[in-house]
Amino acid sequence: MTILFYVLLFLHIVGASMVVGIWIANMKTPTVHPRQRDGAFVQLITGIAMMGILPILHNQNPAEFDPNYFKLGIKFAVGLAVAVLAVIGARKAKKGEAVSTGLAHSVGGLGLLNVAIATLWQ
């Protein structure tokens, strides 16, 4: 179960890098890329899966796996916001409509906020 958790964590980080990396790459001409939407969904799916595994891992090793459900709830809410905004932006881009700078920066900025919450909140 521990190996599965760390594989999911790896994929979760890949999803975050898709959201934030594409945002940074397009900083001069802000837009929302469909891969940012995909990365947001990867993060949501792997995050939910890790939340489901955490109680089992906590029973096996309470010192290493001690979930902070308040923190995880905030991360889920921010991740859900990123996914919704990424879907809106990707649909606009696909239709050829202009994606507002605020929308593009919201997707990337909230993605970066989620990374900050994950790493800085101990």
Image: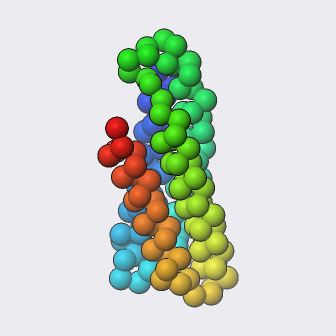
Q: Residue furthest front?
A: 70
Q: Which residue sits at x=37%, y=77%?
A: 27
Q: Is residue 3 left or right of residue 40?
A: left
Q: Is residue 77 left or right of residue 115?
A: right
Tell me if residue 79 can be seen: yes
Quarter occupied by residue 89: bottom right
Q: Which residue sits at x=58%, y=61%?
A: 81
Q: Position of residue 95 (x, y in %)?
A: 67, 82
Nearer-the-camera pick, 90 or 110: 110
Q: Which residue sits at x=50%, y=19%?
A: 57
Q: Position of residue 54 (x, y in %)?
A: 53, 26
Relative vertical location of residue 47 with respect to residue 5 in this rendering, above or below:
below
Relative vertical location of residue 77 with respect to residue 5 in this rendering, above or below:
below
Tell me if residue 31 can be seen: no
Q: Position of residue 37 (x, y in %)?
A: 57, 62
Q: Is residue 122 left or right of residue 4?
A: left
Q: Is residue 42 left or right of residue 29?
A: right
Colour scheme employed for the rendering of this structure = rainbow
Q: Residue furthest left?
A: 120
Q: Position of residue 11 (x, y in %)?
A: 47, 42
